[in-house]
Image (cartoon, rainbow, N blue to C red):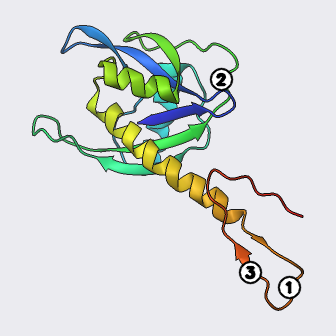
Amino acid sequence: IMIIHDVRENHFLLVERYNPIEGVYTLEFPRAGSSAGPVAESNLAVAMRDLTGLSIRPMEKIGGPLKPDSHIIKGACDVYYGNFTLDENHTPTDKSVRSLKRITKDGLYQAAYDGRIGCALTLSAISMYQAFDSVRKKRVANSQRVRGGKGGKGDAEVEVEADEEVVEE
């Protein structure tokens, strides 16, 4: 599962893809076939190009493996997150993709609530993103710890909350 996020515009890129089992188009995060090692990276690159028209960029594995609950589908998939600039329109080459949708975080949650996102793997990836985003914000905040004073006695580290801005004096 590939979570493609334009942090400048705060949009996520989803594909509107034909689901032959239900006979309808549904919204989902792009995904590649499951594999391990270098094959997985190759599968990500091909799926990224075919489903979105984007070229692969460095992506961080943020979760997984996600395993379907049913015994019908075997296998598992990892969740990857990447920051992309979605300035221009991209054209998918996969015939099962009708269109690409740029959706804000609130729009993503609303689409899940409304049932427009029915893919269990995409819904699981949204949960993984929420956990990752919280951890990411804490990592950023912790990396921005500042020390008061010039290293003298009584100097203390100041913890910064994830939503606070650090101002150095």
User: Element under label 2?
Assistant: loop
Q: CA distance from mark 1 to mark 3?
A: 9 Å
Q: Nearer the viewer, mark 2 or mark 3?
A: 3
Looking at the image, residue 17 sits to the left or right of residue 9; the answer is: left
- Pick the residue in front: 107 or 93: 107
Position of residue 129 measured from the top left corner of the image (x, y, whole percent): 45, 43
Looking at the image, residue 42 sits to the left or right of residue 95; the answer is: right
Q: Which mark is residue 156?
A: 3
- Write the residue at 35% across / 50% down: 64
- The residue labelled by disc 1 is 151
User: Element under label 3?
Assistant: loop
Amino acid type at circle 1 is Gly
**Residue 1: quadrant of the picture:** top left
Q: Nearer the viewer, mark 1 or mark 3?
A: 3
Position of residue 165 measured from the top left corner of the image (x, y, whole percent): 73, 52
Given contact means CB atoms under 8 Å apart, are the residues at marks 2 and 1 in contact? no
Position of residue 106 measured from the top left corner of the image (x, y, whole percent): 49, 27
Tell me which label, 1 or 3, sits earlier in the chain. 1
Looking at the image, residue 115 sits to the left or right of residue 57; the answer is: left
Amino acid type at circle 3 is Ala
- Write the residue at 44% across / 19% down: 15
Q: Is residue 28 visible?
A: no
- The residue labelled by disc 2 is 86
Amino acid type at circle 2 is Leu
Q: Is residue 96 above or below residue 57?
A: above
Q: Nearer the viewer, mark 2 or mark 1?
A: 1
* Outermost residue toward the left in this view: 71
Tell me which label, 2 or 1, sits earlier in the chain. 2
User: Element under label 1?
Assistant: loop
- Pick the residue in front: 117 or 149: 149
